[in-house]
């Protein structure tokens, strides 16, 4: 099988390409700025729509994982045109090119397609994004549904894991508490933190079995940022008193965030052999990785 992964140097893409290579697959790793560590690197700026078509015609991949996006929620709010070009227009071209070669397309989407009023969202729940990032990702989803024959849409939440230059929430907590910095953490925003290696395994099983439709693929625990930070600090023997709980209403953000965008993972836990990890399992596994990276 020939794979093509967009956003292959990103937090999620990097793990996916790593795991695919480990399974002996041929993977074309599309990137924009940062060169990917794994796979066969292919420079592809998704703003150059003609290049997207050329590369798909040339490579003719069997399976495409479209993971690239403008993921900076604030940037999406202040530059809606750029967000639309990267998250919507390029997705349309990709969906149409994939259809021409009758391949399977997986689109990585987000919990931010929901408004956060309900929490523990199932695949069948109504979407209602609050910010432009969520709106563009939802437009991407609709493009896939309208243009593709063989597709899956994965919605995930607060991914974390190790990466050579991307700093996820636990590393930020670790670095600040280690340096005795007091940090403000939201106590009233809830998500389903997702350990990227667990996410990757579940995604690859969905692809291997060519499952189609919507899948909520995240960690199985709904938790506030503050409680998440406390678990990390406790596990790493750091000073919990440096964590200062604050309310989401105090944040000077331009883009509104959903209060509770946690995901219900019962569908994947029913269907897949690989199960979604609890926060405890994820942090246990992750701290082993952190211990290697930081010589704890
Ligand atoms: N991070 C989250 O909190 C989160 C939560 C739920 C869902 N998701 C979704 O999961 C997917 C992967 O996210 P992630 O966390 O891995 O994000 P990430 O680390 O920010 O990676 C995004 C990737 O998109 C690429 N990209 C951005 N603009 C591009 C362009 N013009 N042309 C080509 N590539 C471009 C980036 O490459 P360069 O850096 O080289 O430009 C980067 O490798 C995204 O679709 C995102 O919407 C993310």
Image (cartoon, rainbow, N blue to C red):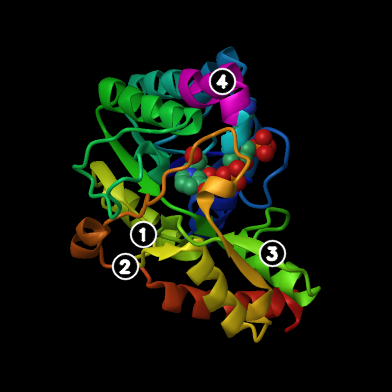
Q: x, y (%) of residue 186?
A: 54, 58
- Frontmost of labels 3 and 1 is 3
In the figure, is residue 47 to the left or right of 127?
right
Cα–Cα span, label 2 and label 3: 35 Å
Which residue is denoted by mark 1 in the rendering? 202
Cα–Cα span, label 3 and label 4: 30 Å
**Nearest to N terminus: mark 2 or mark 3:** 3
Which residue is denoted by mark 2 in the rendering? 274
Which residue is denoted by mark 3 in the rendering? 183
Check disc 3 and report its element: helix, strand or loop. strand
* Residue at image point 56% right, 15% down: 49
Which stretch is magenta?
76-90
- Frontmost of labels 4 and 2 is 4
Cα–Cα span, label 4 and label 2: 37 Å
Which residue is denoted by mark 4 in the rendering? 80
**Nearest to N terminus: mark 4 or mark 2:** 4
């Amino acid at each position: 099988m020939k794979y093509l992964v967009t956003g292959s140097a990103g937090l999620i893409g990097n793990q996916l390409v790593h795991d695919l290579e480990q399974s002996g697959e041929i993977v074309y790793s599309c990137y924009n700025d940062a060169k990917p560590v794994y796979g066969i690197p292919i420079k592809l700026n998704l703003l150059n729509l003609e290049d997207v078509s050329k590369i798909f015609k040339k490579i003719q991949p069997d399976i495409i994982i479209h993971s690239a996006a403008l993921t900076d929620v604030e940037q999406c709010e202040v530059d809606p045109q750029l967000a639309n070009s990267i998250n919507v227009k390029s997705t349309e071209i990709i969906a149409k090119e994939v259809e021409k070669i009758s391949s399977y397309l997986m689109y990585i989407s987000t919990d931010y397609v929901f408004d956060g009023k309900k929490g523990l969202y199932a695949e069948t729940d109504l979407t209602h994004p609050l910010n432009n990032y969520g709106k563009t990702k939802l437009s991407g989803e609709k493009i896939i549904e309208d243009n593709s024959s063989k597709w899956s849409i994965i919605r995930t939440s607060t991914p974390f894991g190790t990466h050579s230059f991307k700093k996820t929430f636990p590393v930020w907590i670790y670095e600040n508490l280690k340096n005795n910095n007091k940090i403000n953490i939201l106590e009233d925003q809830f998500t389903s933190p997702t350990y990227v290696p667990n996410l990757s395994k579940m995604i690859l099983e969905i692809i291997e079995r060519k499952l189609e439709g919507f899948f909520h693929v995240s960690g199985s625990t709904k938790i506030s940022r503050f409680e998440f930070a406390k678990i990390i600090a406790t596990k790493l023997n750091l000073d919990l008193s440096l964590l200062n709980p604050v309310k989401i209403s105090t944040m000077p953000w331009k883009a509104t965030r959903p209060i509770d965008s946690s995901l219900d993972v019962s569908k994947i836990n029913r269907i897949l052999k690989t199960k979604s990890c609890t926060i405890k399992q994820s942090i246990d596994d992750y701290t082993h990785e952190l211990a290697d990276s930081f010589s704890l």
